[in-house]
Image: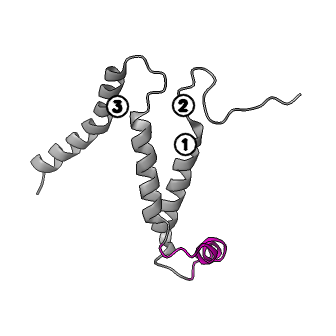
Amino acid sequence: MVEKVDVYSDKSNGSKIYAFDYLRVIALVMILYDHLGGFYNPNWIVKKIIDFFFVVPLDIIQDFGAFGVSLFFLLSGFLFTYNGNYKNEAKKTFKKTMKTYVGCLMAFFYFIFYKD
């Protein structure tokens, strides 16, 4: 007998949406493709393959980097505010905010005080 696998949520508490993780990986691949030279080296074999299968048939006028960044930020913003059956919303938001901004503030103050 075959067991059905639910790829949309974790069976333990239903708080993780795996489909968004897969979409973020796709966005990351799109960004990497753009940074690795799809736009800068038109003779790259990977660019020719992607142009043949995606860009020309879908009439895409720009490379995938900008769309990948937009998709990644959209999904990350949603996941930042997603509750996921968490009981203490204020504590969760504070922890996520601290994770995000502590590194940014440390880098900011480093460059302010230790610039040449």
For marks 1 and 3 on the same chain, the one whose residue lies earlier in the sequence:
1
Which residue of the protein is positioned furthest toward the bottom in this rendering?
43
Where's residue 20, x and y in %?
Answer: 54, 42
Main secondary structure type of the part rendered in magenta: helix
Which residue of the protein is positioned furthest toward the right in this rendering?
1
Residue displayed at 48% across by 67% down:
34
- Report which residue position mark 2 lands on: 16
Give me the disc on residue 96. Answer: 3
| Dot 3: element | helix
Is the residue under label 3 in contact with that under label 1 (CB below 8 Å)? no
Residue 115, magenta (yes or no): no
- Image-quadrant location for residue 21: top right
Is the residue under label 2 in contact with that under label 1 (CB below 8 Å)? yes
| Three-letter residue code for mark 1 | Asp
Where's residue 35, x and y in %?
Answer: 45, 66
- Report which residue position mark 1 lands on: 21
Q: Is residue 47 toward the left or the right of residue 71 in the image?
A: right
Range shown magenta: 43-62
| Three-letter residue code for mark 2 | Lys
Classify 10 Å Cα crowding around label 1: few (below 14), some (14-19), many (20 and above): some
